[in-house]
Image: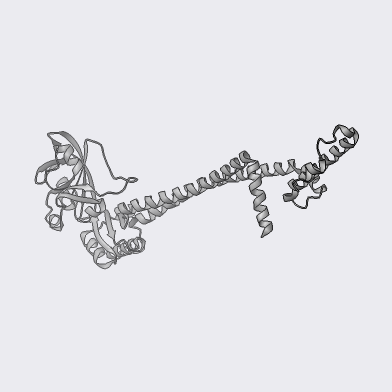
Amino acid sequence: MGQTFEYLKMALQNIRANKGRSLLTMLGIIIGISSVITIMSVGAGFKNEMNKQLDSIAGGQIYLYLSDEGQKREEYMTEDDFAQIESKIDGVTGTSPVFGAAGSTKTLKGKFTVNLTGGGTAQQEISKWKVVRGRYFNQSDIDTANRVCVVNKKDAISMFGTDDVVGMNIEIASDNSTGDFQIIGIVEQENLGNMVTMEYGDEQSVSMDVPYTAMDVFGYDTSSFAYLYITTDKSADTGKVANAAIALLNQLHYSSGESYYDMENFTDQMSSINDMLNMITGFISLVAGISLLVGGIGVMNIMLVSVTERTREIGIRKSLGAKNFFDYDAVFGRVGNHCLHWGLNWNYNWCGTCLCGVFDSNTWFYAGN
């Protein structure tokens, strides 16, 4: 215990004796370690926040689509298929076929490009819409192919100067066809965080959701579908649900062993994003680790130089009787004391009375002992 205390005492003495060198050495080590810790922490925090926001956008969603081979064989999905998927597969909360179309409309504010999305009632959850006025279309609207639409609040203000437009009619032209739609709801996007947004188009482009059955006004076949969204419980394994849905479709269409249907699992996509973020974080951490290693080698080099420079001094101190480095100051103090004592005694004897009465060397040197 006593030796450990002496080691600590020597270390503190050396730090005080070489303040500049000690400060720079500690600064290099502190900055190096802090940089590695900071990079790892920031990388982990960024990944967690990204996962959280991506999960809020597409968590629990599965996208099924007809493959090229399936389209050649015309093995399109039907409404009966959707009902079977919802009733027979555990974890499924809804299905929505999806149609996409581009059109245009004209208001007193000018002409606007319209991005039309035809879907089912689950489209609200898929698009993360929150109704602020009116309502979203329901199953009755789908069953009757009711020509109604919901409009983004921002787009409503762009087209009409206000979002109080529920009940108004709007004429939409697409694919050489024109249809009159009644606005039944105003929606806005749920808060998805600052890192991910779902804004589309420019100032002259607006988005609208309509019942997929109402897309027949533009010449779409609303009885067969090539694309389908499936929503699931947050606790469901989307991979298993997707595989079960494809197996059920193959069974219903007598196409087992064929590759008519394919899927995109957003959970797998998030895993791919995580792998990419882990690679980036790992690479940056490697660079920081190399920098820290270089700094450590520099510190060891300084320590080696310091010891090498004192080799002669250490040898002299040991030859004078020092048992360890903590006795050096005492040894050199005592040697210097005796040397000065001897010299002054010699001068005293040589000079004789010239120095007599000036001082008593023994008293001068040992008065404090």
Say which quarter of the image contains residue 203.
top left
Is residue 87 left or right of 304 when viewed as pictured? left
Q: Indicate whether 202 appears above or below 265.
A: above
Total count of labels: 0
Q: Nearer the viewer, residue 293 or 272?
A: 293
Asked if residue 214 can be seen in this view, the reply is: yes
Is residue 1 left or right of 200 when viewed as pictured? right
Residue 206 locus on image (x, y percent)? 21, 40
Q: What residue lies at 29% left-to-right and 53% top-to-bottom?
A: 71
Q: What residue lies at 42% left-to-right and 52% top-to-bottom?
A: 274
Q: Nearer the viewer, residue 282 or 71?
A: 282
Asked if residue 66 can be seen in this view, the reply is: no
Residue 363 locus on image (x, y percent)? 79, 43
Is residue 251 left or right of 315 when viewed as pictured? left
Residue 67 locus on image (x, y percent)? 33, 53
Quarter of the image that includes the N terminus: bottom right
Residue 134 locus on image (x, y percent)? 13, 50
Q: Indicate whether 69 appears above or below 169.
A: below
Q: Indicate whether 255 appears above or below 311.
A: below
Is residue 197 left or right of 271 when viewed as pictured? left
Say which quarter of the image contains residue 55.
bottom left
Outermost residue, front side: 357
The image's colouring method is one colour
Q: Nearer the viewer, residue 8 or 154?
A: 8
